[in-house]
């Protein structure tokens, strides 16, 4: 998801300009197929930047939530920050029979503030916010005014907050594999230990 300035920099970097640049953080089968059958040159970056630690990832069942929240509280009290990712912006319309029943960013932020983390500042980010509103929320999260950012997958790429070391992914079964990898990568931005808690809505997920 490059912008104009990034593309311009690539064009002026080398004498040979690629007709197609395909990049991914996730070696999914489609990417491998493009490499094998698309006659593409392949560059693999298989090392973390110096000082980065592997992400500790846990799948959290509904009956394990409270214990996980306490782990996250300890990280927040230590000065770290957290993302909470939800599949929806708004609560589903109860009058629609086939509406997808999944957690929403707005309702989850309210629940966390009232019942789980009342002592911390919580912000909300989603695609329906205006650009200046998104930037204001992200600036507050970057400068530490907000301890927790509840968001949809709009923070999947292009977000770099080194102090954010915890991510909760609500309803993880509703996200694709590449999305999960990208979201998980939001917390591997510093030398602090990163954590990813994958919250599922069913015991068999």
Image: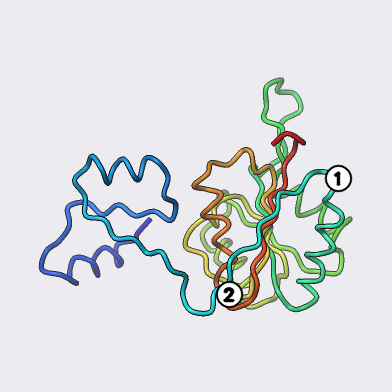
Comes first in the chain, label 2 or label 1: 1
Which is more toward the observer, 146 or 34?
34
Provide residue 113's location: percent of width, then percent of height: 83, 59
Label 1 crowd bin: few (<14), some (14–19), many (20+), radius 10 Å: few
Using residue 8 as the reference point, say whether residue 46 is left or right of it: right
Using residue 68 as the reference point, say whether residue 138 is left or right of it: left
- How many discs mark residues in the rendered view? 2
Q: Cβ–Cβ below 8 Å for labels 2 and 1?
A: no
Provide residue 73's location: percent of width, then percent of height: 81, 67
In which quadrant of the rendered image does the N terminus lie? bottom left
Q: Which residue lies under the disc numbered 2? A: 162
Quarter holding residue 155: bottom right
In which quadrant of the rendered image does the C terminus lie? top right
> What residue is drawn where x is 37% and y is 40%?
30
> What residue is drawn where x is 29% and y is 60%?
43
Q: Disc 2 on helix, strand or loop?
A: loop
Q: List the single residue furthest toward the left.
A: 15
Q: Disc 1 on helix, strand or loop?
A: helix
Using residue 58 as the reference point, say whether residue 39 is left or right of it: left
Q: Nearer the viewer, mark 2 or mark 1?
A: 1
Quarter holding residue 75: bottom right
Q: What is the C-alpha distance between the residues marked 2 and 1?
A: 30 Å
> What residue is drawn where x is 67% and y is 27%?
99
Q: Is residue 128 above or below residue 18?
A: above
Q: Which residue lies under the disc numbered 1? A: 63
Label 2 crowd bin: few (<14), some (14–19), many (20+), radius 10 Å: some
Which is more toward the observer, 189 or 90?
189
């Amino acid at each position: 998801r490059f912008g104009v300035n990034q593309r311009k920099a690539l064009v002026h970097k080398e004498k040979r300009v690629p007709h197609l640049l395909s990049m991914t953080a996730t070696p999914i089968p489609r990417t491998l197929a493009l490499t094998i059958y698309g006659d593409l040159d392949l560059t693999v970056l298989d090392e973390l930047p110096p000082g980065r630690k592997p992400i500790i990832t846990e799948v959290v069942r509904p009956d394990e939530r409270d214990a996980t929240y306490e782990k996250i509280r300890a990280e927040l009290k230590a000065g770290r920050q957290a993302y909470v990712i939800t599949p929806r912006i708004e609560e589903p319309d109860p009058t629609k029979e086939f509406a997808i029943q999944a957690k929403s960013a707005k309702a989850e932020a309210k629940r966390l503030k009232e019942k789980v983390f009342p002592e911390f500042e919580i912000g909300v980010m989603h695609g329906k916010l205006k650009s200046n509103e998104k930037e204001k929320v992200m600036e507050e999260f970057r400068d530490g005014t907000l301890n927790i950012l509840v968001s949809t997958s709009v923070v999947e790429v292009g977000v770099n907050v080194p102090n954010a070391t915890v991510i909760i992914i609500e309803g993880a079964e509703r996200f694709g594999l590449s999305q999960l990898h990208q979201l998980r990568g939001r917390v591997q931005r510093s030398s602090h230990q990163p954590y990813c808690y994958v919250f599922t809505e069913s015991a068999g997920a």
